[in-house]
Amino acid sequence: MTLTIPFDNSYARLPNSFYARQAPIPVRAPRLIAFNSELAKVLKVTPGEVEEMAEAFAGNTLPDGAEPIAQLYSGHQFGNYNPQLGDGRAVLLGETIGTDGLRRDIQLKGSGPTPFSRQGDGRAWLGPVLREYVVSEAMHALGIPSTRALAAVETGEIVLREGPMPGAVLTRVAQSHLRVGTFQVFAARGQLDSLRRLTEYAIDRHYPDANGPMGLLRAVVEAQSQLIAAWMSVGFIHGVMNTDNCSIAGETIDYGPCAFMDSYHPNTVYSSIDRMGRYAYSNQPDIAVWNVAQLATALIQQMEDKDAAVEEATEIVHAMPAQLQEGWLKRFRAKIGLMTEEEGDLELISDLLTRMAQNQADFTNTFRALGGDAARDQFTDPAAYDEWSEGWNARLGREQDPSTVMAAANPALIPRNHRVEKMIQSAVQGNYEPFQRLNTVLARPYEDQPDADDLKRPPSETEVVHATFCGT
Protein backbone atom coordinates (compact mmCIF):
# COMPACT_ATOMS: atom_id res chain seq x y z
CA MET A 1 0.00 0.00 0.00
CA THR A 2 0.96 3.63 -0.47
CA LEU A 3 0.76 6.20 2.30
CA THR A 4 -2.18 8.50 1.60
CA ILE A 5 -3.40 11.42 3.67
CA PRO A 6 -6.68 13.02 2.53
CA PHE A 7 -5.60 16.63 3.02
CA ASP A 8 -8.23 19.35 3.09
CA ASN A 9 -6.20 22.45 3.94
CA SER A 10 -7.81 25.67 5.12
CA TYR A 11 -5.09 27.57 7.00
CA ALA A 12 -2.85 27.59 3.95
CA ARG A 13 -5.62 29.48 2.11
CA LEU A 14 -5.40 32.37 4.57
CA PRO A 15 -3.24 35.40 3.58
CA ASN A 16 0.52 34.89 3.34
CA SER A 17 1.01 37.15 6.38
CA PHE A 18 -0.26 34.28 8.58
CA TYR A 19 2.65 31.95 7.84
CA ALA A 20 5.78 31.26 5.84
CA ARG A 21 5.75 28.58 3.19
CA GLN A 22 8.44 26.18 4.28
CA ALA A 23 9.18 22.60 3.31
CA PRO A 24 10.70 20.23 5.87
CA ILE A 25 14.48 19.89 5.65
CA PRO A 26 15.45 16.32 4.65
CA VAL A 27 17.37 14.15 7.09
CA ARG A 28 20.13 11.62 6.50
CA ALA A 29 18.68 8.24 7.48
CA PRO A 30 15.08 8.21 8.70
CA ARG A 31 13.81 5.17 10.58
CA LEU A 32 10.24 4.74 11.76
CA ILE A 33 10.02 4.29 15.54
CA ALA A 34 6.27 4.30 16.01
CA PHE A 35 3.07 4.70 14.02
CA ASN A 36 -0.30 5.23 15.70
CA SER A 37 -2.57 3.06 13.59
CA GLU A 38 -5.62 3.71 15.79
CA LEU A 39 -5.29 7.47 15.29
CA ALA A 40 -4.54 7.00 11.61
CA LYS A 41 -7.93 5.34 11.13
CA VAL A 42 -9.67 8.34 12.70
CA LEU A 43 -7.72 10.67 10.39
CA LYS A 44 -8.51 8.49 7.35
CA VAL A 45 -4.78 8.05 6.80
CA THR A 46 -3.86 4.94 4.84
CA PRO A 47 -0.47 3.59 5.98
CA GLY A 48 2.19 2.66 3.48
CA GLU A 49 5.36 0.61 3.59
CA VAL A 50 7.55 1.23 6.63
CA GLU A 51 10.33 2.86 4.62
CA GLU A 52 7.87 5.10 2.80
CA MET A 53 6.32 6.25 6.09
CA ALA A 54 9.75 6.90 7.58
CA GLU A 55 10.60 9.17 4.64
CA ALA A 56 7.27 11.02 4.84
CA PHE A 57 7.13 11.48 8.61
CA ALA A 58 10.74 12.65 8.66
CA GLY A 59 9.96 15.26 6.01
CA ASN A 60 12.14 13.79 3.25
CA THR A 61 9.11 13.34 1.00
CA LEU A 62 5.79 15.14 0.94
CA PRO A 63 2.52 13.19 0.69
CA ASP A 64 0.23 14.30 -2.12
CA GLY A 65 -1.83 17.30 -1.10
CA ALA A 66 0.53 18.57 1.59
CA GLU A 67 1.08 22.35 1.71
CA PRO A 68 3.85 22.77 4.29
CA ILE A 69 3.87 26.05 6.20
CA ALA A 70 5.37 27.46 9.40
CA GLN A 71 2.78 29.42 11.35
CA LEU A 72 3.35 32.91 12.72
CA TYR A 73 2.57 33.85 16.32
CA SER A 74 4.00 35.80 19.25
CA GLY A 75 3.48 35.38 22.96
CA HIS A 76 4.25 36.08 26.57
CA GLN A 77 7.04 33.84 27.82
CA PHE A 78 7.19 33.76 31.63
CA GLY A 79 5.24 37.01 31.62
CA ASN A 80 7.48 38.85 29.14
CA TYR A 81 6.15 39.63 25.67
CA ASN A 82 8.13 38.37 22.70
CA PRO A 83 6.83 40.14 19.58
CA GLN A 84 7.63 37.32 17.15
CA LEU A 85 7.92 33.60 17.79
CA GLY A 86 6.32 31.28 15.24
CA ASP A 87 7.05 27.68 14.32
CA GLY A 88 10.80 27.61 14.67
CA ARG A 89 11.17 23.84 14.37
CA ALA A 90 7.87 22.63 12.94
CA VAL A 91 5.88 22.70 9.74
CA LEU A 92 2.18 22.15 9.30
CA LEU A 93 1.77 19.65 6.47
CA GLY A 94 -1.96 20.23 6.21
CA GLU A 95 -5.32 19.24 7.63
CA THR A 96 -7.66 16.28 7.45
CA ILE A 97 -11.31 15.82 8.28
CA GLY A 98 -11.63 12.63 10.29
CA THR A 99 -14.21 9.91 10.53
CA ASP A 100 -15.72 11.87 13.44
CA GLY A 101 -16.15 14.98 11.29
CA LEU A 102 -13.43 16.95 13.13
CA ARG A 103 -10.81 18.93 11.23
CA ARG A 104 -7.28 18.35 12.52
CA ASP A 105 -3.78 19.59 11.77
CA ILE A 106 -0.94 17.22 10.93
CA GLN A 107 2.38 18.80 11.86
CA LEU A 108 6.01 17.67 11.74
CA LYS A 109 7.87 18.78 14.87
CA GLY A 110 11.66 18.86 14.65
CA SER A 111 11.65 19.12 10.87
CA GLY A 112 14.40 21.73 10.50
CA PRO A 113 14.84 25.50 10.57
CA THR A 114 12.18 27.92 9.36
CA PRO A 115 12.13 31.71 8.95
CA PHE A 116 10.98 31.82 12.60
CA SER A 117 13.82 29.74 14.05
CA ARG A 118 15.67 32.70 15.62
CA GLN A 119 19.08 31.07 15.03
CA GLY A 120 17.90 27.70 16.37
CA ASP A 121 18.65 24.47 14.55
CA GLY A 122 14.99 23.63 14.05
CA ARG A 123 15.56 20.08 15.18
CA ALA A 124 14.42 17.90 18.06
CA TRP A 125 16.31 15.20 19.85
CA LEU A 126 14.91 11.78 20.60
CA GLY A 127 14.10 12.36 24.28
CA PRO A 128 11.48 15.13 23.94
CA VAL A 129 9.94 13.38 20.93
CA LEU A 130 9.37 10.18 22.89
CA ARG A 131 8.23 12.09 25.96
CA GLU A 132 5.60 13.96 23.95
CA TYR A 133 4.49 10.78 22.20
CA VAL A 134 3.99 8.88 25.45
CA VAL A 135 2.53 11.69 27.54
CA SER A 136 0.18 13.11 24.90
CA GLU A 137 -1.24 9.66 24.17
CA ALA A 138 -1.54 8.99 27.91
CA MET A 139 -3.45 12.26 28.34
CA HIS A 140 -5.83 11.23 25.58
CA ALA A 141 -6.41 7.89 27.29
CA LEU A 142 -7.08 9.74 30.57
CA GLY A 143 -9.87 11.62 28.78
CA ILE A 144 -8.07 14.97 28.85
CA PRO A 145 -8.13 17.10 25.65
CA SER A 146 -4.70 16.89 24.07
CA THR A 147 -2.70 17.00 20.90
CA ARG A 148 -1.84 13.49 19.82
CA ALA A 149 1.06 11.60 18.28
CA LEU A 150 0.71 9.97 14.87
CA ALA A 151 4.32 8.93 14.29
CA ALA A 152 7.89 9.21 15.53
CA VAL A 153 10.98 8.87 13.38
CA GLU A 154 14.71 8.72 14.08
CA THR A 155 16.62 11.00 11.72
CA GLY A 156 20.00 9.28 11.74
CA GLU A 157 21.56 12.65 12.59
CA ILE A 158 22.99 14.18 15.74
CA VAL A 159 21.69 17.36 17.36
CA LEU A 160 23.59 19.30 20.00
CA ARG A 161 21.88 20.04 23.32
CA GLU A 162 23.65 19.31 26.62
CA GLY A 163 25.83 17.16 24.37
CA PRO A 164 25.43 15.20 21.14
CA MET A 165 21.95 13.63 21.02
CA PRO A 166 20.17 11.43 18.45
CA GLY A 167 17.75 13.43 16.33
CA ALA A 168 14.07 12.63 15.83
CA VAL A 169 10.85 14.05 14.35
CA LEU A 170 7.37 13.81 15.88
CA THR A 171 4.20 13.91 13.82
CA ARG A 172 1.76 15.85 15.99
CA VAL A 173 -1.98 16.03 15.48
CA ALA A 174 -4.11 18.86 16.89
CA GLN A 175 -7.60 20.28 16.41
CA SER A 176 -5.57 23.30 15.35
CA HIS A 177 -2.37 25.07 16.29
CA LEU A 178 -4.14 28.37 16.94
CA ARG A 179 -2.78 29.87 20.15
CA VAL A 180 -3.39 32.99 22.21
CA GLY A 181 -0.13 34.17 20.68
CA THR A 182 -1.56 33.84 17.16
CA PHE A 183 -4.01 36.62 18.02
CA GLN A 184 -1.44 38.64 19.94
CA VAL A 185 0.93 39.05 17.02
CA PHE A 186 -1.64 40.74 14.77
CA ALA A 187 -3.04 42.87 17.59
CA ALA A 188 0.42 44.07 18.60
CA ARG A 189 1.24 44.96 15.00
CA GLY A 190 -2.03 46.79 14.51
CA GLN A 191 -2.92 44.47 11.61
CA LEU A 192 -6.62 44.59 12.34
CA ASP A 193 -7.77 43.10 9.04
CA SER A 194 -5.65 40.02 9.75
CA LEU A 195 -6.92 39.93 13.34
CA ARG A 196 -10.53 40.00 12.12
CA ARG A 197 -9.81 37.30 9.56
CA LEU A 198 -8.17 35.12 12.20
CA THR A 199 -11.09 35.63 14.59
CA GLU A 200 -13.60 34.63 11.92
CA TYR A 201 -11.48 31.60 11.04
CA ALA A 202 -11.22 30.47 14.67
CA ILE A 203 -14.96 30.82 15.22
CA ASP A 204 -15.78 28.93 12.03
CA ARG A 205 -13.33 26.15 12.82
CA HIS A 206 -13.84 25.66 16.56
CA TYR A 207 -16.88 27.49 17.90
CA PRO A 208 -19.40 28.06 15.10
CA ASP A 209 -22.08 29.03 17.61
CA ALA A 210 -19.94 31.83 19.07
CA ASN A 211 -21.19 35.35 18.43
CA GLY A 212 -18.27 37.53 17.36
CA PRO A 213 -14.97 38.15 19.18
CA MET A 214 -16.52 38.21 22.66
CA GLY A 215 -18.40 35.01 21.89
CA LEU A 216 -15.07 33.45 20.97
CA LEU A 217 -13.59 34.69 24.23
CA ARG A 218 -16.42 33.10 26.21
CA ALA A 219 -15.91 29.79 24.41
CA VAL A 220 -12.16 29.78 25.04
CA VAL A 221 -12.71 30.61 28.73
CA GLU A 222 -15.01 27.61 29.06
CA ALA A 223 -12.63 25.28 27.19
CA GLN A 224 -9.59 26.39 29.17
CA SER A 225 -11.47 26.17 32.47
CA GLN A 226 -12.40 22.56 31.80
CA LEU A 227 -8.90 21.72 30.61
CA ILE A 228 -7.09 23.12 33.65
CA ALA A 229 -9.53 21.41 36.03
CA ALA A 230 -8.72 18.15 34.27
CA TRP A 231 -4.97 18.76 34.62
CA MET A 232 -5.32 19.44 38.32
CA SER A 233 -7.37 16.28 38.88
CA VAL A 234 -4.53 14.01 37.70
CA GLY A 235 -1.63 15.99 39.17
CA PHE A 236 -0.36 17.17 35.78
CA ILE A 237 2.05 20.10 35.61
CA HIS A 238 2.48 21.64 32.17
CA GLY A 239 5.65 23.48 33.08
CA VAL A 240 5.62 26.22 30.45
CA MET A 241 2.17 27.85 30.24
CA ASN A 242 3.25 30.72 28.00
CA THR A 243 0.55 32.30 25.86
CA ASP A 244 2.08 30.70 22.78
CA ASN A 245 1.37 27.33 24.45
CA CYS A 246 -2.26 28.15 25.23
CA SER A 247 -4.52 26.49 22.65
CA ILE A 248 -7.68 28.23 21.48
CA ALA A 249 -9.22 24.79 21.01
CA GLY A 250 -8.74 23.93 24.69
CA GLU A 251 -6.24 21.15 24.10
CA THR A 252 -3.04 20.43 26.01
CA ILE A 253 -0.25 21.45 23.66
CA ASP A 254 3.57 21.45 23.79
CA TYR A 255 4.77 18.76 26.17
CA GLY A 256 8.16 20.21 27.00
CA PRO A 257 9.15 20.20 30.68
CA CYS A 258 5.86 18.62 31.76
CA ALA A 259 5.44 16.00 34.46
CA PHE A 260 2.93 14.28 36.72
CA MET A 261 3.38 14.74 40.46
CA ASP A 262 4.43 11.85 42.64
CA SER A 263 4.26 13.13 46.24
CA TYR A 264 1.59 15.81 46.43
CA HIS A 265 2.60 19.37 47.14
CA PRO A 266 0.82 22.41 45.67
CA ASN A 267 4.09 24.24 44.96
CA THR A 268 5.61 21.44 42.89
CA VAL A 269 7.70 22.61 39.92
CA TYR A 270 9.57 20.39 37.47
CA SER A 271 10.57 22.73 34.66
CA SER A 272 14.29 23.54 34.73
CA ILE A 273 13.60 27.03 33.34
CA ASP A 274 10.79 27.93 35.79
CA ARG A 275 13.11 29.23 38.48
CA MET A 276 10.49 31.42 40.18
CA GLY A 277 7.72 28.81 40.23
CA ARG A 278 5.42 30.81 37.97
CA TYR A 279 3.98 27.62 36.51
CA ALA A 280 3.87 25.53 39.69
CA TYR A 281 1.01 23.05 40.04
CA SER A 282 -1.16 25.30 42.20
CA ASN A 283 -0.58 28.37 40.02
CA GLN A 284 -1.97 26.83 36.84
CA PRO A 285 -5.57 28.07 37.28
CA ASP A 286 -4.40 31.66 37.86
CA ILE A 287 -2.06 31.50 34.88
CA ALA A 288 -4.88 30.23 32.67
CA VAL A 289 -6.91 33.31 33.63
CA TRP A 290 -3.90 35.54 32.93
CA ASN A 291 -3.42 33.93 29.50
CA VAL A 292 -7.06 34.38 28.56
CA ALA A 293 -6.85 38.01 29.67
CA GLN A 294 -4.10 38.46 27.06
CA LEU A 295 -6.44 36.96 24.46
CA ALA A 296 -9.14 39.40 25.53
CA THR A 297 -6.72 42.31 25.16
CA ALA A 298 -5.90 41.17 21.63
CA LEU A 299 -9.51 40.58 20.56
CA ILE A 300 -10.63 44.01 21.81
CA GLN A 301 -8.38 45.74 19.29
CA GLN A 302 -10.73 44.90 16.40
CA MET A 303 -13.90 46.14 18.14
CA GLU A 304 -15.45 49.44 17.06
CA ASP A 305 -16.82 50.31 20.50
CA LYS A 306 -13.73 49.60 22.60
CA ASP A 307 -15.22 50.86 25.84
CA ALA A 308 -18.11 48.42 25.57
CA ALA A 309 -15.73 45.65 24.51
CA VAL A 310 -13.46 46.26 27.51
CA GLU A 311 -16.46 46.11 29.83
CA GLU A 312 -17.74 42.86 28.33
CA ALA A 313 -14.29 41.25 28.17
CA THR A 314 -13.63 42.21 31.78
CA GLU A 315 -16.87 40.54 32.85
CA ILE A 316 -15.97 37.37 30.91
CA VAL A 317 -12.43 37.11 32.29
CA HIS A 318 -13.47 37.97 35.85
CA ALA A 319 -16.00 35.10 35.71
CA MET A 320 -13.32 32.58 34.80
CA PRO A 321 -11.98 31.83 38.32
CA ALA A 322 -15.47 30.74 39.38
CA GLN A 323 -15.72 28.49 36.31
CA LEU A 324 -12.34 26.98 37.12
CA GLN A 325 -13.36 26.40 40.71
CA GLU A 326 -16.60 24.77 39.61
CA GLY A 327 -14.78 22.43 37.23
CA TRP A 328 -12.12 21.64 39.84
CA LEU A 329 -14.69 20.89 42.53
CA LYS A 330 -16.72 18.63 40.23
CA ARG A 331 -13.65 16.56 39.39
CA PHE A 332 -12.33 16.35 42.94
CA ARG A 333 -15.77 15.47 44.29
CA ALA A 334 -15.71 12.48 41.96
CA LYS A 335 -12.19 11.61 43.09
CA ILE A 336 -13.49 11.09 46.63
CA GLY A 337 -16.66 9.34 45.46
CA LEU A 338 -19.18 12.18 45.56
CA MET A 339 -21.79 12.80 42.89
CA THR A 340 -24.13 14.96 44.95
CA GLU A 341 -23.20 18.42 46.20
CA GLU A 342 -23.08 19.50 49.84
CA GLU A 343 -21.81 22.69 51.41
CA GLY A 344 -18.83 21.18 53.21
CA ASP A 345 -17.37 19.31 50.23
CA LEU A 346 -14.73 21.91 49.40
CA GLU A 347 -13.42 21.87 52.96
CA LEU A 348 -13.39 18.04 52.99
CA ILE A 349 -11.32 17.89 49.79
CA SER A 350 -9.00 20.70 50.85
CA ASP A 351 -8.39 19.02 54.21
CA LEU A 352 -7.34 15.81 52.45
CA LEU A 353 -4.96 17.66 50.15
CA THR A 354 -3.42 19.55 53.07
CA ARG A 355 -2.82 16.31 54.94
CA MET A 356 -1.37 14.70 51.79
CA ALA A 357 1.09 17.58 51.38
CA GLN A 358 2.12 17.38 55.05
CA ASN A 359 2.63 13.60 54.84
CA GLN A 360 4.32 13.27 51.44
CA ALA A 361 1.45 11.14 50.14
CA ASP A 362 1.60 10.02 46.53
CA PHE A 363 -1.10 11.89 44.60
CA THR A 364 -2.17 9.12 42.19
CA ASN A 365 -1.86 6.15 44.53
CA THR A 366 -3.64 7.87 47.43
CA PHE A 367 -6.74 8.72 45.43
CA ARG A 368 -6.79 5.33 43.68
CA ALA A 369 -6.68 3.52 47.03
CA LEU A 370 -9.11 5.67 49.03
CA GLY A 371 -11.00 3.63 51.57
CA GLY A 372 -8.37 0.94 52.06
CA ASP A 373 -5.14 0.36 53.92
CA ALA A 374 -3.15 1.20 50.81
CA ALA A 375 -4.35 4.81 51.06
CA ARG A 376 -3.35 5.31 54.71
CA ASP A 377 -0.01 3.64 53.95
CA GLN A 378 0.79 6.56 51.64
CA PHE A 379 1.01 8.88 54.67
CA THR A 380 4.12 9.24 56.79
CA ASP A 381 1.66 9.53 59.69
CA PRO A 382 -1.28 7.22 58.89
CA ALA A 383 -3.26 8.75 61.74
CA ALA A 384 -3.60 11.90 59.62
CA TYR A 385 -5.50 9.86 57.05
CA ASP A 386 -7.57 8.11 59.69
CA GLU A 387 -8.71 11.43 61.17
CA TRP A 388 -9.79 12.71 57.77
CA SER A 389 -11.51 9.49 56.73
CA GLU A 390 -13.95 9.64 59.66
CA GLY A 391 -15.70 12.68 58.20
CA TRP A 392 -15.34 11.33 54.68
CA ASN A 393 -17.00 8.02 55.54
CA ALA A 394 -19.90 9.90 57.10
CA ARG A 395 -20.25 11.93 53.89
CA LEU A 396 -20.09 8.77 51.72
CA GLY A 397 -23.06 7.38 53.60
CA ARG A 398 -25.24 9.78 51.65
CA GLU A 399 -23.95 8.60 48.23
CA GLN A 400 -25.28 5.82 46.00
CA ASP A 401 -22.21 4.12 44.43
CA PRO A 402 -19.00 5.88 45.49
CA SER A 403 -16.67 3.02 44.56
CA THR A 404 -17.70 3.12 40.90
CA VAL A 405 -17.43 6.91 40.85
CA MET A 406 -13.90 6.83 42.29
CA ALA A 407 -12.71 4.08 39.96
CA ALA A 408 -13.74 6.18 36.97
CA ALA A 409 -12.14 9.38 38.33
CA ASN A 410 -8.83 8.07 39.67
CA PRO A 411 -6.34 6.48 37.27
CA ALA A 412 -4.25 3.56 38.45
CA LEU A 413 -1.47 4.45 36.04
CA ILE A 414 0.13 7.69 34.88
CA PRO A 415 3.35 8.31 32.93
CA ARG A 416 5.56 8.74 35.97
CA ASN A 417 8.48 11.01 35.34
CA HIS A 418 11.21 8.58 36.39
CA ARG A 419 9.75 5.89 34.15
CA VAL A 420 9.64 8.26 31.21
CA GLU A 421 13.28 9.21 31.79
CA LYS A 422 14.35 5.56 31.99
CA MET A 423 12.41 4.87 28.81
CA ILE A 424 14.30 7.66 27.06
CA GLN A 425 17.65 6.37 28.31
CA SER A 426 16.83 2.91 26.97
CA ALA A 427 15.76 4.29 23.60
CA VAL A 428 18.99 6.26 23.25
CA GLN A 429 20.75 2.91 23.66
CA GLY A 430 18.55 1.43 20.93
CA ASN A 431 16.07 -0.40 23.18
CA TYR A 432 12.48 0.66 22.47
CA GLU A 433 10.76 -2.01 24.55
CA PRO A 434 10.13 0.35 27.52
CA PHE A 435 8.66 2.92 25.10
CA GLN A 436 6.34 0.35 23.59
CA ARG A 437 5.37 -0.99 27.01
CA LEU A 438 4.49 2.46 28.36
CA ASN A 439 2.28 3.16 25.36
CA THR A 440 0.49 -0.17 25.73
CA VAL A 441 -0.08 0.08 29.48
CA LEU A 442 -1.01 3.78 29.56
CA ALA A 443 -3.67 3.25 26.89
CA ARG A 444 -5.79 1.73 29.73
CA PRO A 445 -4.99 3.99 32.70
CA TYR A 446 -8.17 3.30 34.69
CA GLU A 447 -7.68 -0.48 34.71
CA ASP A 448 -5.77 -2.40 37.35
CA GLN A 449 -3.14 -4.22 35.33
CA PRO A 450 -1.25 -6.71 37.53
CA ASP A 451 1.58 -7.01 35.01
CA ALA A 452 2.15 -3.24 35.32
CA ASP A 453 2.34 -2.98 39.11
CA ASP A 454 5.96 -1.80 38.85
CA LEU A 455 4.77 1.23 36.84
CA LYS A 456 2.50 2.28 39.72
CA ARG A 457 5.33 2.64 42.19
CA PRO A 458 6.62 6.12 43.01
CA PRO A 459 10.33 6.74 42.49
CA SER A 460 12.85 5.79 45.15
CA GLU A 461 15.07 8.56 46.49
CA THR A 462 17.68 7.79 43.83
CA GLU A 463 15.09 7.70 41.04
CA VAL A 464 13.46 11.08 41.67
CA VAL A 465 13.67 13.38 38.65
CA HIS A 466 13.87 16.93 40.01
CA ALA A 467 13.98 18.84 36.71
CA THR A 468 12.64 18.40 33.20
CA PHE A 469 13.82 20.21 30.08
CA CYS A 470 12.31 21.71 26.94
CA GLY A 471 14.79 20.04 24.61
CA THR A 472 15.19 23.09 22.35
Image (tube, rainbow, N blue to C red):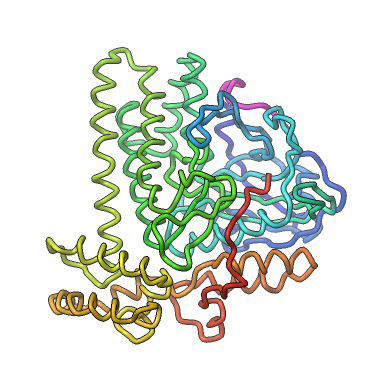
Q: Position of residue 22 (x, y in %)?
A: 72, 31
**For the point 61% across and 49% down, which residue is it?**
172
**For the point 38% across and 76% down, which residue is it?**
368
Tell me: 403 left or right of 45: left
Q: Position of residue 26 (x, y in %)?
A: 82, 42
Q: Nearer the viewer, residue 321 or 70?
A: 321
**Does 4 appear above or below 393?**
above
Q: Is residue 65 magenta?
A: no
Q: Position of residue 281 (x, y in %)?
A: 42, 53
Which quarter of the figure is the C terminus placed in? top right
For the image, the number of numbered tags is: 0
The magenta stretch is: 14-22
**For the point 28% across and 13% down, which residue is it?**
305
Tell me: 159 left or right of 273: right
Which quadrant would residue 289 be assigned to in this image?
A: top left
**Does 423 appear above or below 387?**
above
Tell me: 55 left or right of 306: right
Tell me: 167 left or right of 36: right
Which quarter of the figure is the N terminus placed in? bottom right
